[in-house]
Amino acid sequence: MLAPLPASEWTLEAAGHLFNRAAFGGTPEEIQKLHAMGHSSAVQSLLNAGEDEDLFPSPEISPLRPYRELKNASASPAEMMEKKKMIQAQVRRETIEARIWWINRMASTPFPAREKCVLFWHGHWATSIQKVNDPFLILQQNQTLRAHAFGPFDLFAKEMSKDPAMIRYLDLNSSKVGRPNENFAREFMELFTLGEGQYSEEDVQEVARSFTGYRINPDTGGFFFAARSHDSGVKKIFGKTGNMSGDETVDLIVSRPQCAEFLSAKFWNFYAGENPSSPLNQVLASEYRASGLKMDDFLKRIFLSREFYAPKYRRRQIKSPVQWLIQTCKILERPLPDPRVIQSTLEQLGQVPFAPPNVKGWDGGRAWISSSTLLLRYNLGGALVRNARGAKPDIEKILPSETTAEAACDLLSWRLFQAPMTTALREKTIDFLKNNGRSPASHGDLIHLLMSTPDFQLT
Amino acid sequence: MKQTLHTRRQFLRTSILGGAVSWTIPAFLERTFFTLDAMAMDSLVQTTTGKDGPIFIVLQLAGGNDGLNTLVPLSDDAYFQARPTIAIPGAKTLRLTDELGLNPQLTGLKALHDEGHLAIVQGVGYPNPNRSHFRSTEIWHTASDSAKTEKYGWMGRYFDACCKGSDPSIGVSIGSQTPQAFAAPEPRGVTFAKPEQFRFDLKNAADHDVADEFFRSVNDFESEQMDGASIGMLQGHADGSGNTLDFLQRTSLDAVVSSDKVAEIIKRTQPGASYPSNRLADSLNLVARLIGGGMPTRVYYVAQGGYDTHSSQSGSHERLMKELDASLASFTADLKAQGNFDRVVLMTFSEFGRRVAENASGGTDHGAAAPLFLIGGKVKPGIYGKPPSLTQLHDGDIIHNVDFRSVYATVLSKWLNAPVEPILKRNFPIMSFI
């Protein structure tokens, strides 16, 4: 089992590490506050998740409008084309609306660790608007991810097998007795629960049979079970024979030992920043099992462990574009930029929520960075520091003009990196401060420049 | 950290020392020469320079180009029967042979054909064709078998096998996303849509020069002061091979050096021909300027989208063909004027062709094999590959006669002088279009 972090090692830097990884980071004051709570209470407070629906009412999107409207139209082909175009424009608009709503929620919720976890699950149960083509279903799935993010995995997996966006994304809606579609069955085992090579082709076919008859209710956009299309016959899955329902099949798969191992490695990669070694993953998987596959319980175990705070994990994870954007706004204490800027930033940096590149989700890690996305990060950082239009950070608050050069270095490194600067960077920063006047404009330049470094891309 | 930028020889030949550049060579680059000289000695294949060496350009027609309406089988009744409303009458095509004519919009390609600079390979595809845009694009980019998923791209594997120690801009992709073809364990290549965006932007800085100097000094990871540990005194290997920070530092240095070079070339060069105004033409115009300006790039990647013509395709496909043709005509004229046409081979491809039979909406659905074009001063002109049958189909789709990896293998071995097997995982028949 994982050894706990000794109280003496619960430092400010450890608190910063926890805050960055479990959530989206924050200001030096927020990290200070988290640290002052003591380790155990800090972890507990992050994993609390209450209702914040009142603060973030969902955008109003009605179900399945595009398809119904198209069907009802008794129009000429030209009119149909026109209609189709209008519907596509609406799908685009509503998708962006839903996306901005979620980004905004990540940035301002009192429960940021849950939103971070929802972001993880979105990459796990990756579903894209590109195929689903219905913002209502995508938003509905996002709420399902939120409802189950911290909960037990078996229940979550059952809900996801019945999630209408997923049903459409992986072609469950056309899967019926006699003609099962294997797409969902395969990805469910390969990407969602067990990992490649942990099942046979026969298992795929048999699992596909048990998920037949899963449909989308066209009136509500909810799930419905078409019993007549369901294959209730006898199946043989992982050597077990019976007339398993979809839910029973989920139980069968989730209870396989590989499931906890597959997931614990994926969690560790997301939160600690690297794939665990095999012995470490054995420990992680047994912690996960001991938590009853319940996410908040498992996260509590890793966030309290000494391993999670080991030096090799600290400041070595490349921020995802979403993390980069939200954390940057938080540490600059500025509001999120204009929705159009958010949208184009995420597009350019390569992480557009609700549009993962494929069912594997985002590769993450080094795949976030190319020479052009790195320069874009440097340039977008400049826009967030000193964009002439719209909200600007209060540079004087971040770095008061009278601060001595030495103290300024401390302030900036804490705020920007949540760790001390190297001697070399510190010397250059001090030179800059001494030679370039101490106006907010030149301080703004310095902040932008410190953000335009490889170090700032790490958390 | 070992940084691989240029050999000293290369360096002297390319513009950084020779041309009028606005910034002086950082000390770290000078130091790098010595390391690189040594590395280049070890390398099996000498890296290319800006002024010589072959250049390969990939042009992706994204969305699935309708091969049958691009290269029209004008004497085949099956074509006209399968496409009662969208078939192009033989008389309208630009006739190449008694059997084949080009789409009427492809006048520039016809001219290239007539002057002997166009090769056409017919019926290109792969076994067990996949009809998903995403998956089939991945197959073309990674050169994998249909049933296998391969992470790295064929160009990425080429860079890995043959361009060790080369400039980061050995591959340049014009667009917003790095193509999977460039993916490699140690990725190389730079991607940008507009040169003015591929710059560290300090125009709003209070003091531009001071900020620029600071930026360059903190992104100079070769100098002794910056070597090794950075923020937080923490060493570690948190992400695959090598340290994540090393990886970021290397990429940052690549970005600074390549973007300076691109900016310098854009400043120094003028468009050499008049181009139509569309995205593909903009991309090709940029590529021509980079070639003319002496970028040490071996592979360029550009794309034209919009080929997913499921409905009312006649008008839209015509427009795409026209856009493609006019852009290529300007581009080839530009390269000829530069004297670089002989250094270049351009290959088009699309993730798949389209169904032989038109659908109920005057369009065509996803298909399989299709023709592709190769253009260049050294291309051996002609029509290659057996004409595909329009009556013996597989699920309504054309069966390929040429595996696309045969085309790749030919380009690799005959144009880029690269070994085929390490890059494509096995050998494929070599063709004679080069």
Image (spheres, coloured by chain):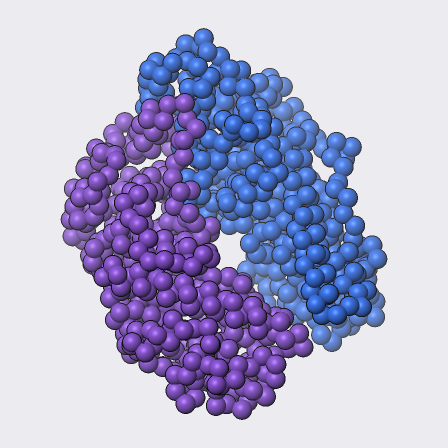
Does residue B403 sit above or below B267 in this rendering?
A: below
Q: Give B424 or A326, whichever is nearer the viewer.
A: A326
Residue in the image at 51% along x and 50% along y: A363
Using the rendered image of the protein, determine whether residue A295 is visible from the camera's viewpoint.
Answer: no
Q: Which of the 4 quarters of the picture holds residue A172?
A: bottom right
x and y, in percent, of residue A125 in the image? 64, 52
Residue in the image at 73% along x and 52% along y: A137
Chain in blue in the render = A
The answer to whether B127 appears left or right of A163 in the picture is left
Using the rendered image of the protein, determine whether residue A36 is visible from the camera's viewpoint.
Answer: yes
Count of numbered circles on the image: 0
Q: Which of the 4 quarters of the picture holds residue B300?
A: bottom left
The answer to whether B48 appears left or right of A237 in the picture is left
Residue in the image at 57% along x and 18% along y: A29
Taking the view exactly as shown, the residue that stands out farthest to the front is B274
Does residue A44 sit above or below A410 in this rendering?
A: below
Q: Give A231 or A347, whichever is nearer the viewer.
A: A347
x and y, in percent, of residue A165 in the image? 71, 55
Q: Give A66 or B109, whichever is nearer the viewer.
A: B109
Residue in the image at 77% along x and 68% along y: A75
x and y, in percent, of residue B431 in the image? 31, 78
x and y, in percent, of residue A291 in the image? 67, 40
> Chain B drawn in what color?
purple
* Quadrant showing the N terminus of chain A: top right
Q: Which of the 4 quarters of the picture holds residue A57?
A: top right
The answer to whether B107 appears left or right of A394 in the picture is left
